[in-house]
Amino acid sequence: MATPILELKGVGKSFHSADGSARPVLEGVDFTLNEGEIVALLGQSGSGKSTMLRILAGLIGADRGQVSYHGMPLYGAARGIRMVFQSFALFPWLTVQKNVELGLEAQGVAPAERARRSEQVIDLIGLSGFEGALPRELSGGMRQRVGIARALVMEPEVLLMDEAFSALDVLTGERLREEILELWESGKIPTKAILVVSHNIEEAVMMADRVLIFASNPGRVRAELPIALARPRAVDSSEVRQLIDEVYGLMTAGSSRPGRATEKEAKLQLGDRLPEADSARIEDVLELLLEEPFLGRADLPQLGEESELTDQELLDVSIALALLGFANLAHGDITITPLGEQFVAADHPARQAIFGRQLLEHVPLVAYICHGLEQDRSGDLPKELFLKLLRFTLNSDDAESALRVAVEWGRYANLFEYTFHTGTIQLPRGDAPTFE
């Protein structure tokens, strides 16, 4: 029987919106991390994955529910839990060895013991010979090794990794991931459980014993996929490819509305996040869908390889295509719709017109901007007006992202223009489009 180490029961977390009201980021999260397993957590940006990780690390508290470590309530950071961040977070004026020793020094470990343990971990993580180097003298992959070594030197029972490989190039990230797995499988590290937050579906399938899919608004566990394959896993094996396809299907289920789990909830609201897909990428993927070998229908992992998009980029584009009615998503496949085919066959002005009609029908934020411009005598409104509105339901970063996407889409469709140096949105010069 599995032995639970970390548990969340009915956990909720809220942050304050611009008007001071509580904005739920997590709601009703149930999760157990068991001894001897690696779990991967996937979900759209802003779904609360990193917030959940910080609650498990004891860095922030939950507002509701129970957080326990070995069955006892977790209040603050625990010695047996360590976290590796996406950013390297190294002190630039300290050497590799001094950066690795920081946690030990904070615990009052004697200098000789600090040196012994840090040198041992530095050797284990492949940094021997670089003990005296400064972070600026290291490559990105080596800097992340320092971050991992800084966590491992504390001999953690639980290792939490928040997109630890995402800032690295593909080959470096793969190599480092494989080395972590080798340390885990060989028992060279005392860690008993690992939780990985990732945007990389292949990475999750290659590493994890379980993959959890997070929904958004608020964040919660929407689906779970157990993986029984032995490690190391062959990335080109039929079993791995099938699992990757299954994860794509779980992540795009009900995706006409980003982060929603069912088609009943598919209609966007004014304050929802928007998928970060620009119009050029939307055009490129639609055109690719009609070419060989797809001819209108594609397996998402294969489309990702052909388009050379990252998993997150492909998911954002696919969700945007479904949102705008240009494609349908089901079971990890994407199929172009008749409207999508009409869009690809059209010239640029006709594409703008089609895109504009779909925006006004399916993206309330764009329709709201157009309505505001039509009602304002000057036809010129500051972006802060819309950001203020979005901050009632979104955090500042997500509000900026949603408005940035809406403006880019609206400019492409010639619904409005944007002046960057003044931060104002205005009606197009010349013949204005009709917003009805």
Image: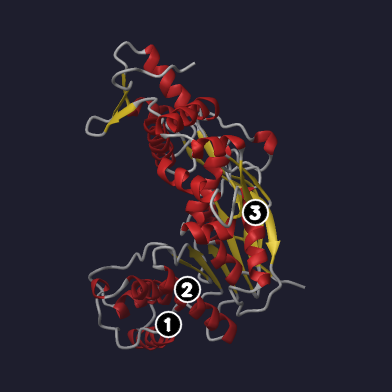
Mark 2, Cα crowd under 10 Å, few <14 / some 14-19 / many 20+, is some
Q: Amino acid at mark 1?
A: Ile
Q: Quadrant of residue 204?
A: bottom right
Q: Amino acid at mark 3?
A: Gly
* Marker disc for residue 174: 2
Identify which residue is drawn at 41% across, 77% down: 149
Mark 3: secondary structure? loop
Q: Quadrant of the N terminus?
A: bottom right
Cα distance, mark 1 to mark 3?
37 Å
Query: Residue 391 vs residue 327: left or right?
Result: left
Mark 1, Cα crowd under 10 Å, few <14 / some 14-19 / many 20+, is some
State the residue position of label 1. 125
State the residue position of label 3. 332
Q: Earlier in the sequence, mark 1 or mark 2?
A: 1
Q: Amino acid at mark 2?
A: Glu
Query: Residue 231 vs residue 436: left or right?
Result: right
- Residue 252 appears in the rendering: yes
Instruction: Pick the residue in front: 250 or 222.
Output: 250
